[in-house]
Amino acid sequence: MYYCSKFLKMKFSNRLIDWYLQNNRDLPWRKTKNPYFIWLSEIMLQQTRVNQGLSYYLRFTEEFPTVFGLANAAESEVLKLWQGLGYYSRARNLHHSAKYIANELQGVFPTTYDEIKKLKGVGDYTASAISSICFDLPEAVVDGNVYRVLARYFGIDTPINSSKGVKEFKELAQTLIDVKKPGTHNQAIMDFGALHCKPQNPLCATCPLNESCVALEKVQIKKLPVKEKKIKVRKRYFNYLVILTDRKETVLNERKGKGIWQGLYEFPVLESEKSIDETALVVSEKFNQLPLKKYQISLFNEKEIVHKLSHQHLYTKFWIVTVASLEQSMISWSAVNKYPVPVLIANFLKDFNPSH
């Protein structure tokens, strides 16, 4: 544990807040203390950059200006609005918690760290951010930006993704927080990490903390923070069967279970152990389960599309299967864009013209 004198704590926080007051980003959720809006922004910005999340935040707040609006929406509507932002469990958890707040709490957002943390999809970081910004509670946030600032400034090489590191950095962040202005302090250190103490090419020459930064003094800026080795990336091979009838109808299925893209829609998919050709495709069990009689098949993309997720890479082929008709539930091609789909499917839909 890193001991900080009262003077060092004040100096660290004051210099960050001074920097923040001159350099903070003009963001819509900074203009409110309404916990509903702060909660929305914090959930959206998990695993997402501000410039990507901003447009989603504006759309969500326009579509659902209150927690009741979000609670009353259909899950498919929420997922469609979230489409392209990734990590879709965030959207499902957001919707689940909105219904809990609206129905069980009569629309009144929880006001303590412990109660906020009980919301589905809310962890220490989000609970700390909401409770400090909205309710002035001295709960320190620790996200990727904060890990980086603290690791460099104090010269800490404990891996940030280890249980020891998580505890160590949280305790340190808690000793540094300005208890009189916890929300401003938290936003200051996060913005400082995002804009000044950046992962690559941090602005050390103009850093307000450079005279006492351990990593700068010991030339360890590029080495810190330390992360334990990543989980091995799994390769998966997806073969999408894009069925198209003479009446311009197709098949979409909802993904079930706890895997990727739960609740999103996709074309029938054959997952293979390796890349396969048309011969292997048409003799597969999945292909033959479709009630196809006379059909024509063609490969849309000669080169596999590699879609990268956090712990898996999807090597994807889209097979266009044209048939006169199909004896199963179909939807009009013109209705496909109304369904929430993974960005992999959304990109295909932009490129494919069923009229050709």
Image (tube, helix red, strand yellow):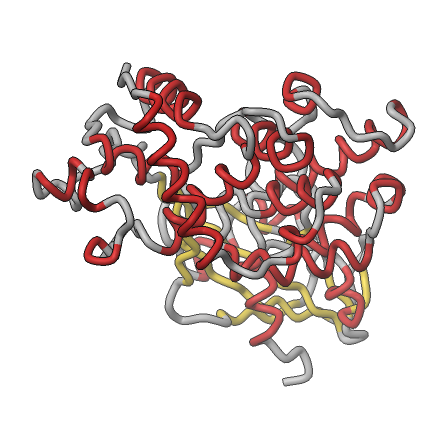
Q: Nearer the viewer, residue 243 or 53?
A: 53
Q: Quadrant of the N terminus?
A: top left
Whether residue 40 is situated above or below residue 182 in the rendered picture? below
Q: Residue 130 is drawn in which quadrant?
A: top right
Q: Nearer the viewer, residue 121 or 115?
A: 115
Q: Position of residue 338 (x, y in %)?
A: 78, 62
The residue at the point 48 percent across, 30 percent down is 178
Q: Is residue 49 left or right of residue 57?
A: left
Q: Nearer the viewer, residue 137 or 268?
A: 137
Q: Residue 292 is drawn in which quadrant?
A: bottom right
Residue 106 visible to the viewer? yes
Whether residue 209 is situated above or below residue 321 in the rendered picture? above
The residue at the point 44 percent across, 31 percent down is 142
Residue 311 visible to the viewer? no
Q: Position of residue 172 (x, y in %)?
A: 36, 22
Whether residue 125 is situated above or below residue 352 in the rendered picture? above
Residue farthest toward the front in the current orientation of the protein: 7
Q: Position of residue 48 (x, y in %)?
A: 50, 50
Residue farthest toward the left in the current orientation of the protein: 218
Q: Is residue 66 left or right of residue 250?
A: right
Q: Is residue 225 left or right of residue 334?
A: left
The residue at the point 57 percent across, 61 percent down is 26
The residue at the point 82 percent across, 57 percent down is 63
